[in-house]
């Protein structure tokens, strides 16, 4: 199987949003799921646009070879990023790294651009990170180097963790970590907008360390093929780690939580607005839930009360008693639900997941330890 081919088939969604969601239409076209003359013509046009995108990447790549284009910060920088658009698990890994640095005696700071942040307020990733690693400073600024230098001028810092930094090449990094989602590893083999790749696969040779996420959601043969393909794309000495997204608990609207046993053998509705909704559905099913209704919104969706009311009504009409979402969506749902004049007609919960390494974590610990003690 060539690198560009999807290694899994998406489960049919029962979402009314799927048909009208431009993101889903685009994915159906670039993945080859949508057939016919119209889809073929769309792919041809997207291929032309992808050629222009690659030309822009070529110019940008030459720019980073100019002296002074890449600047080093006064503190070690660990970058966490990916090669494809959509969710690969960056936020859980950033939180895991922040906790790891703190446990090893270091003082971490998280740097991010603040994509899709409301004016003057943190975006959903920042809110989720605040919940996952409370007390760790998080600086959101497009000029991440300046944000870091302004911070260290007044505060202690041992390591900066650059969130979504693989393409932010103007800031030198001491450890470049790239995430590969086992469900969509190589972006259908094309750069944007014909595929999901932000850069050609050859960019993987910049990585110092690769992490295959959601490795528990594919079969052993698929995983073995993915690992073999990845070894051919990375530098020969680049470690490859395997991780999974482990469900931890369910967060309830009243501030309480349930263990995962609460989900088992329960018919539920689920809804999310993330880069890889299929991964969320599969995680719920592996936890024992029967997902009878699955509503999908665009990634980084700005929910309105009407959005939530519509999903809740669909769940109620389907005779379901529980609606589950992701941690990233939960931080946007909570204020809307709290401000609603009526109690939700079904129980609303969020599935909290944690990144857990299955193979190779010691290699990461050695790298972090070397940065803390140099």
Image (cartoon, helix red, strand yellow):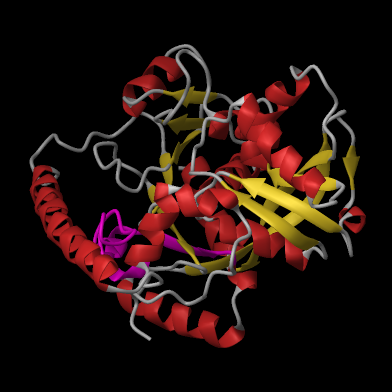
Above or below, 260 relative to 252: below
In the image: residue 216, left or right of residue 187: right
Is residue 318 in view from this perspective?
yes
Q: Seen in the image, is 56 located left or right of residue 163?
A: left
Residue 196 percent coordinates (x, y) = 34, 58
Please say if 347 is above or below 336. below
Is 206 magenta? The answer is yes
Instruction: Report the number of numbered marks.
Output: 0
Q: Is residue 65 above or below residue 289?
A: above
Query: Could you tell me residue 219's position as x and y percent?
Result: 61, 82
**Residue 360 image offset from top left, x and y in percent:** 58, 68
Which range of residues does the magenta coloring cover?
187-214
**Closest to the observer, 73 or 342:** 342
Residue at 54 percent across and 63 percent down: it is 363
The image quadrant where one finds the C terminus is: top left
Q: Residue at x 70, y 21 (%)?
A: 335
In the image, residue 106 lies at what x, y percent? Answer: 59, 35
């Amino acid at each position: 199987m060539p690198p560009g081919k999807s290694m899994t088939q998406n489960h049919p969604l029962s979402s009314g949003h799927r048909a009208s969601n431009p993101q889903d239409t685009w994915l159906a076209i670039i993945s080859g799921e949508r057939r016919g003359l119209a889809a073929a013509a769309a792919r041809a046009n997207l291929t032309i646009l992808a050629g222009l995108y690659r030309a822009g990447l070529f110019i940008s790549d030459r720019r980073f070879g100019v002296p002074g284009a890449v600047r080093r910060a006064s503190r070690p920088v660990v970058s966490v990023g990916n090669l494809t658009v959509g969710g690969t698990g960056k936020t859980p890994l950033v939180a895991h790294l922040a906790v790891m640095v703190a446990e090893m005696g270091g003082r971490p700071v998280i740097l991010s651009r603040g994509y899709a942040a409301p004016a003057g307020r943190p975006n959903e990733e920042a809110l989720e990170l605040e919940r996952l690693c409370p007390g760790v400073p998080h600086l959101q600024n497009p000029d991440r180097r300046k944000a870091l230098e302004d911070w260290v001028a007044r505060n202690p810092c041992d390591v900066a963790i650059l969130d979504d930094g693989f393409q932010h090449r103007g800031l030198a990094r001491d450890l470049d970590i790239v995430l590969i989602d086992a469900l969509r590893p190589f972006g259908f083999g094309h750069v944007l907008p014909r595929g999901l790749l932000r850069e050609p696969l050859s960019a993987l040779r910049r990585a110092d360390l690769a992490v295959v996420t959601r490795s528990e959601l594919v079969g052993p043969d698929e995983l073995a093929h993915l690992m073999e393909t990845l070894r051919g794309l990375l530098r020969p000495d680049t470690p490859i780690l395997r991780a999974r997204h482990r469900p931890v608990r369910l967060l309830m609207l009243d501030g309480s939580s349930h263990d995962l046993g609460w989900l088992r053998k329960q018919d539920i509705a689920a809804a999310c607005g993330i880069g890889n909704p299929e991964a969320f559905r599969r995680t719920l099913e592996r936890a024992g839930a029967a997902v009878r209704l699955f509503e999908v919104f665009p990634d980084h969706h700005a929910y309105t009360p009407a959005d939530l009311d519509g999903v809740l009504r669909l769940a109620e009409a389907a005779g379901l008693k529980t609606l589950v979402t992701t941690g990233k969506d939960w931080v946007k749902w909570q204020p809307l639900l709290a401000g609603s004049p009526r109690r939700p007609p079904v129980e609303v919960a969020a599935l909290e997941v944690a990144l857990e390494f299955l193979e190779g974590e010691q290699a990461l610990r050695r790298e972090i330890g070397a940065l803390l003690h140099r």
